[in-house]
Amino acid sequence: MSEIRIAHARKIYEGNTPVIDDLSLDIKDGSLFTLLGPSGCGKTTLLRMIAGFNSIEGGDFYFGDTRINDIEPSKRNIGMVFQNYAIFPHLTVKDNVAFGLKQHKVPKDEVEKRTNEFLKLMKIGQFESRKPDQLSGGQQQRIAIARALVINPDVLLMDEPLSNLDAKLRLDMRQVIRDVQHQVGITTVYVTHDQEEAMAISDCIAVMSFGEIQQVGKPKELYHRPHNEFVATFIGRTNMLDGTLLHEGGKAAIELAGGYRIPVAQLDAATDQPVRVSIRPEEFVRCPDGPIEGTIVDSVYLGKDTDYFVKTAFSDRIQISEESSFSENLVPGDSVHLKVNTAKINTFTKDGTKNLLEEVG
Amino acid sequence: MKRQSSWNIWTVAATLIFVGYLLFLIYPIITILGSALFVDGQLSLGNFASFFSRQYYFDTLMNSFAVSGMATVLALLLGAVLGYVFAMFQFRGKKLLQILIIVASMSPPFVGAYSWILLLGRQGAITKFLQIYLGFGEINIYGFAGIVLVFTLQLFPLVFLYVSGALKNVDSSILEAAESMGSRGAKRFFSVLLPLLMPTIVAAALLVFMRAFADFGTPMLIGEGYRTFPVTIYEEFISEVGNTNSAFASALAIIAIVISLVIFLIQQVVANRFSYSMNSLHPIEPAPVRSWKKVVMYILVYGAIFIAVLPQGYLVYTSFRNTKRMVTVAGYSFENYANAIRRDGVSIINTIRIPLLGLAIVLVVGTLLAYLAIRKKNAFTGLLDTLSMLPYIIPGTVLGIAFITAFNSGVGGTGFLTLTGTVAIMAISFALRRLPYTVRSSEAALRQIPVTIEEAAESLGSSRLNTFLKITLPMMASGIVSGAILTWITMISELSTSVLLYTVKTRTMTVAIYTEVVRGNYGIAAALGTILIGFTVLSLLLFMKISKSDSLTL
């Protein structure tokens, strides 16, 4: 078990601009840490640098106190789980799991004992003598996890391990990974592009875009206090609106197009400026005396919730979300009144790079 | 991972292979280039000038183009039509016919020529029948017609296998879509199917042309006065060896390489222009055929394949007949076999041991080279990959000449590697000629293995060598083994290089057959030919068992 420290990492593929220029990151011992971002953001590249399958063009990588830059992947004592499982097709389930132990010259009875232990932990004991091609994707991924963990690695690296599974199985395996990680308590770096999956599984998330870390934080922090517009829009859904921050008698408010003002007491100390406001769909609340007038454009029934798209003075189409009820029957053209749950909105500078709440502390 | 500066198992392997290619490919080619270009120590194009100025030589080149072109057209027609019929329609005995086609395609090429002489030659069985019972005059199989006939029957199976393979990748929904838009039958064939098959047909055409162009045994046996280019190269070289030098033959060899190179480049360009990818979820289901069409189909399919395997069949039959030199006499016995083993027993053993040695080289070098080119891609391994393709464009006769010239008195005349006349030089030449195919097929097998599988092994603490031996090789194994059997089959039926390189001690069966035919010992040649066909068929059956398929993809 160990902490992972990355200082000023740099990755350039031959003759190109850097994929990662200067990236630093600390991953706490025993935590499940997720690298989250859209495809091409460099998250898998970074993971493969930690694993040793990508060269490192700059910076230092540490497992605990050991600098691993120049250590072969086979000597880094990592466990890795791949998107396509990478199960050895010519070996049985049991031999797959035992492979790493044999490479580490573990005594025979110890190999047997540890292998059985992890076959049991991952609930694949009954398939031990089968060839992998007779097993489902979910079962193959269980083998992959058992195979990675059985060698007692310092860190566990997982590269989009659930993306090849169907939706239902993905939810089950998500829980399996979380449970096993807690039981074993191993430092885990998990790569995904699925923000919901990241939120559900992680102790801590680093949101990445274009090779840079946008924000590191707990799932809750990312959702409620995103650093910048990118994080606000990438994590969950939101309405991004243009507005102006102004003060009236020392009280801060954001004025949206059409003159509607949202009081924001948290920003009393900030200076007047044009801003971008993020209001999540569930923070718009429909109520008869709400100050915002709107017209329903469209609605999407999702079972538990219903999404409405509403035209207002400040936007042609804002999204609001509320719990469904059987009696409700709003159709396009109906007019509604809305208010905003002001405690939970986020305000960014005009260019979207900074959350004003952080600036004023 | 560290930069590739340090020596590891892969850089060592790459370097060794490179040295091998330098010695056994680059150096021999440079040697013949040198002897073609330098006349009395002076750089001169004299040898080339005398080729193009002498009508006699130039004609042989034109002859080669004529027979190869004609054979290509006919083989394409026959192969493509059969491929289409096999894919689209139901009929009986399909599986057996498919195996027979493969046997025909794999049989030693010049054995076909020899069998046709037995059938349609001056003393041929069919010739006699026609002359005695139907009052035909002289029948002339020798020359242009004979060469084209043999080439066509030898090469249409290749086209068939190519086209069948391509049709397997056509999704039946494409045909159904065409039908739903009103395109059926012949119209659909020309507007939808033919364009889809075009890349395959072009590739097959060039391959067939190249094989025909480079073939030595067939025109040598059945061509008589009608000389083709490879025959000329061979005879010029043989006649020159005794007296002065091999300069003129070398010049001819260079011309042959240049022609092959041009054809190869055309093939590459065309393949790139026409290529697109198809994947077929629902392969075409053969449909039943009725009425007169059914009769026509059966006659066509069974007729074509009967003619294709007729020479092999007749050869087997002849081998059991009592023979007196060129004439068969009454009665059946194993006498031919006894004579064959007495006179040419060594060649049978050579036909096993020399190709086995060549096969070993091909397997080791081919697998390593494929791994280097795919997994350790860089400028150097790219160069190796290109080098491995080079023998593809060098006709067998030319390679034979180059090897003799280069290793007659050792490398650069130093006595080091004086290989002429050894088993080694034969095995190396076999390996060199077959490597382009093996490297390609191993690369294809390797591409099927995700890199992450090897990375998974490494992450579990496995060293590079261990990963290669325990993970990569076992996963490639079935592809390697079936490729090895095909390699073996082509090696045992090789003639054009071995006919130049052999000595009494290293004579192979193909050379023995050739010699016996030339000497007029038809019975012994037939017995040897039958043994060779037996080896081929057995190997093919083994191949089908291992690759678990009754079809062959090239």
Image (cartoon, coloured by chain):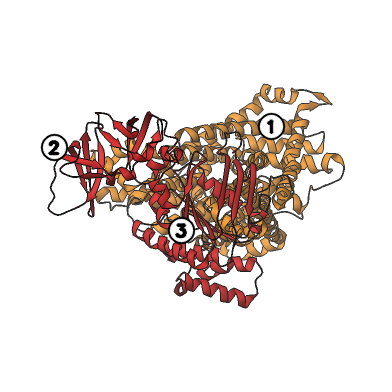
Disc 3 secondary structure class: loop
- Evaluate whether residue B510 shows in this view: yes
**Farthest residue in the right direction?**
B414
Q: Quadrant of residue A166?
A: bottom left
Kindly identify which residue carries mark 2. Answer: A333
* Residue plotted at (23% across, 38% down): B182
Q: Is residue A273 above or below residue B167?
A: above
Q: Amino acid at mark 2?
A: Gly
Supply the letter of whichever chain is red. A
Q: Is residue B507 above or below residue A18?
A: below
Q: Is residue A32 above or below residue B54?
A: below
Q: Quadrant of residue B466?
A: bottom right
Kindly identify which residue carries mark 1. Answer: B254
| Quarter in which the N terminus of chain A is drawn | bottom right
**Callout 2 touching callout 3 (CB < 8 Å):** no
* Residue plotted at (40% across, 49% down): A195
Q: Amino acid at mark 1?
A: Ile
